[in-house]
Image: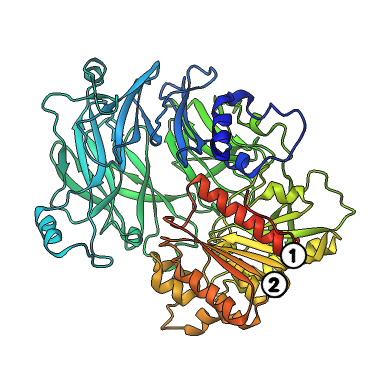
Amino acid sequence: MDRLNVIFLFLILIPWTVFGQAEEEIRTPSIEEVISLRSVSNVQISPNGKHVLFQVESTDWHNNRFDSELWLSRDGEPPFQLTNNLNGDSFSPVWSPNSDQILFLRNHNDKNQIFFINISGGEPQLLSYIDKNIQQFSLSPNARTIAFLGEEKISEEEEELKKRYGNYSFHDQDYRLNRLYTIPFDSNFVLNEQITSKKDSINTVRPKAAQITTHLTKTTFSINNLAWRPGSNQIIITHQPNPNVTSFLESDLSIYDLESQELKTIVRNKSVDSFITWSPDGQAFMYLSSIDNDSTNFILNDRYFIYDMVSSSSKEIASSFDENLQNIIWMNGGIFATAYQKTTQPIFQINPTTGAVVNVFKDKRLISDISVSQSGSEMAIIARDGNELNEVYLGNTNKYSFKKLTNINSQIKKWKTSQNEVISWKSKDGTIIEGVLHKPYNFNPAEKYPLLVIIHGGPTGISLPHPVPSKVYPFLQWLDKGTLILEPNYRGSAGYGERFRSLNQRNLGIGDSWDVLSGVDFLNEKGLVDTARLGTMGWSQGGYISAFLATYSNRFKAASVGAGISNWVTYYVNTDIHQFTRQYLLANPWQDMEIYNKTSPISYINNASTPTLIQHGELDSRVPIANAYELYQGFQDVGVKSNLIIYKGFGHNITKPKERLAATWHNWQWFGKYFWDEDIELQ
């Protein structure tokens, strides 16, 4: 039995609540153990407020995948695992209106299909009469109809053309639209009429005469979101010209009536219009819109509106709130949401009448998800402090008093974790920059330490305090070697307002390097850093900044560039989101080649001396692999030590545990050799 399978068996045999307690001594975990941490997400409280459903992600080393399954806490009791799909995830749960049944998606026969389960447990049942790959689904308010989105079927004419001419496509033109479908649903029938498939022992249901109805067949747009209007037979849809990723900039909102089959477009602006949530009575809904801004809306704050169904008019809300809202829910009692406030994420309540935004809960540093009951009295959240992993909590919206339902942090109880703090410093132009400083377990402020800078992606990402940061970097192992790690929230990061996000327009790389290097200088002035041992790394935009630092600066002893941009021209003509580049550089290359050259790492390749590891997914469409090849060849031509590692079959992120383990080990090896002068072999 190989090493990974032994670890896998070890993980599944230890109960969740005692995970990590076998070792009595405080110790540094292995890289595999860090990758194997369970985590919680997507909390959903039942409409009656009594039960809490959530997803748990675990690591299946044997099948080389991260597995997401549903867990349930009934009546506030300790949660239990509700689903166990051996061949894929169970996700996107939807409560029935009476709070006793759950529908969810599960990968089955290479399709996302709808399953059904009672909260008392038992085996999930496949609604096998829906033989489509479902992208999103919703249960009607009366629980009698399921509406869902899926790709339209390929036509017979297209099938014949493929048979004759083979497989080819016209770029940005060959796609299948996402259509709206409905199917009758009777939970009583489902419970009573089960058929067991001989092929895979899955319980299925096949109601008589059940037929999928395809709607809006004559429309030429693609639907990317749907939601039933409360108390009605109407569905609101967000639609765009086609399924291509950049087409969302032309999205609009329409109401479709299933009885009359009438479609009415009700919000149509020049730029993005996107549905968020209905009011509880269905008389209004909240949406975001960029109105006519399609040139800087990636950077500026989202704008939020309430549309009144009676008057057919919109009004803007939360206009004075200087950040983007997340996890927005409109229930009795108001609109609830979260938002980053620097490195915190509290809960806010928005008054739908006045549009005022009030901070109502900040007892935990970071609230990453919220769900509110139908009455608005009960709330479930996922939250943590800076030295914790996320846990699920159940409480109320009157006193904001919460009870912890999970015990995720038991996994790291005996681990040496990051001792972190949020620090701030002035950048070259006077801008205040924050960052998370991770310190070794036995940190001594009188000593000088090697410093590794790990840079988040985005640029509108954010680094937050965390006891076990990982990504594809061995954080805890480096801390154990006696290293400081700085995660800077450079200009453009989320959580610091609209003006801060705008500071790297036409200043990419250059302004970012100011922020990183001034952070290094700040720590050096505090007497904490051995400036002869500096390293930098990051993924995506963080990879780009690390590439810029490795070519523009000679201060770093080693670097790692993950899925990074090396040449903005190369990026612009290859990426699937051309608008990103135009919004940050305010021009395309043919209008202003100077700004493209000024902000591209490859422009400074003759200055480069930093040994650099380049990591990239083979099928990356967001930052295409041409960027990796170009940077690698540049380093080779000027004689800088470099390696290019390509992760086969992956896009912009490394989404399987074995390859994530490999990527982490590759960084461990690279910095071992060029940072610590150690030769490390894969184990």
Corner quadrant of residue 332: top left
**Residues at badges 1 and 2 in contact (C-beta under 8 Å)?**
no
Residue kind at label 1, given as amino acid type? Leu
Query: Where residue 116 sits: x, y (%)?
Result: 31, 25
Residue kind at label 2, given as amino acid type? Asp
* SS for dot 1: strand
Query: Where residue 218 sits: x, y (%)?
Result: 13, 52
Q: Residue at x 54, y 49 (%)?
A: 660
* SS for dot 2: loop
**Along the line of sight, the residue nearer the viewer: 179 or 414:** 414
Q: Residue at x 63, y 61 (%)?
A: 537
Viewed as shown, does residue 379 lie left or right of 175? right
Query: Where residue 136 sits: x, y (%)?
Result: 31, 41
**Along the line of sight, the residue nearer the viewer: 613 or 572:** 613
**Whether residue 353 is situated above or below residue 321 in the rendered picture:** above
Residue assigned mark 2: 429
The disc, 1 or 2, on the residue closer to the chain's N-terminal end is: 2
Residue assigned mark 1: 534
Q: Which mark is residue 157?
A: none
Query: Where residue 129 sits: x, y (%)?
Result: 19, 31
